[in-house]
Image (tube, grey):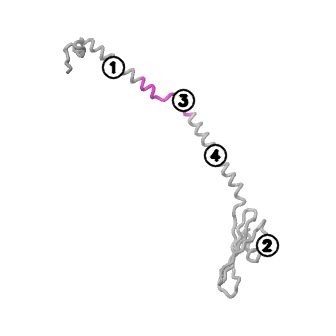
Amino acid sequence: MLRWKEDDGLNILQDASPETLSYVLLAAACAAAVLLIILLVRARPKASAEMLTPDEVIQQQFAAVARRLDALEQGVAQIGTALPSTVQSVGVVRFNPFPEMGGNMSFSMALLDARANGVVISVLNDRQGSRVYGKPVEAGVSTQKLSDEEQKAIGLARGRKV
């Protein structure tokens, strides 16, 4: 078992004079202050690498806006290139090809792009079923013979009054 002697060196503070104690406390406080300053300096962001002036921030934001504008202009150019070949006009004519049936249940529909290229689709309905026909259209005309209703549908799609 361990026994403590009264003079084993652990009672240093009891043996020290009040003047010595004040110096020890002052030295400890200074060491703590220096340690705190070192920690604060290490934690602070570096001015040259991370901090930007207001002008630099505005220049970076302007560059980001310019990049976005360039991307938008490229997208608009791609859309402008693709747009002429998309369906831009539709003409529909309903008709009754079979007089024994009532109503205009059949129709012809022209789907054309900006150059009047596309397709005319005709659907003929009767009591036994439906028949669907598709014919190509280039520059507003077809290489296949068109019915009157198909020609009217193309004319409507091209903006002509029928």
138 above or below 94? Answer: above
* Magenta stretch encompasses residue 52: yes
Which residue bears the numbered disc 4?
69
The quarter of the picture where residue 21 lies is top left
Q: Which mark is residue 29?
A: 1
Which residue bears the numbered disc 3?
49
Q: Which mark is residue 144?
A: 2
Q: Which of disc 4 and disc 2 is earlier in sequence?
A: 4
Compared across the picture, whether 121 is left or right of 8 comes to: right
- Per the model, the C-alpha gap separating discs 2 and 1 is 101 Å
* Magenta stretch encompasses residue 39: yes
- Per the model, the C-alpha gap separating discs 4 and 1 is 59 Å
Compared across the picture, whether 63 is left or right of 35 comes to: right
- Per the model, the C-alpha gap separating discs 2 and 4 is 47 Å
What is the secondary structure assignment of the residue under circle 4? helix
- Per the model, the C-alpha gap separating discs 4 and 3 is 28 Å
Q: Position of residue 3 (x, y in %)?
A: 19, 18
Q: Which mark is residue 51?
A: none
- Per the model, the C-alpha gap separating discs 1 and 3 is 33 Å
121 above or below 127? Answer: above
Kindly give the residue lying farthest to the front in the view shown: 1
- Residue drawn 72% across and 63% down? 113
Q: Quadrant of the N terminus?
A: top left
Give, as a three-letter code, the residue at label 1. Ala
Give, as a three-letter code, the residue at label 2. Gln
Q: How packed is label 4: few (under 14 Cα within 10 Å), some, or many (20 or more)?
A: few
Q: How packed is label 1: few (under 14 Cα within 10 Å), some, or many (20 or more)?
A: few
Q: Which of disc 1 and disc 4 is earlier in sequence?
A: 1
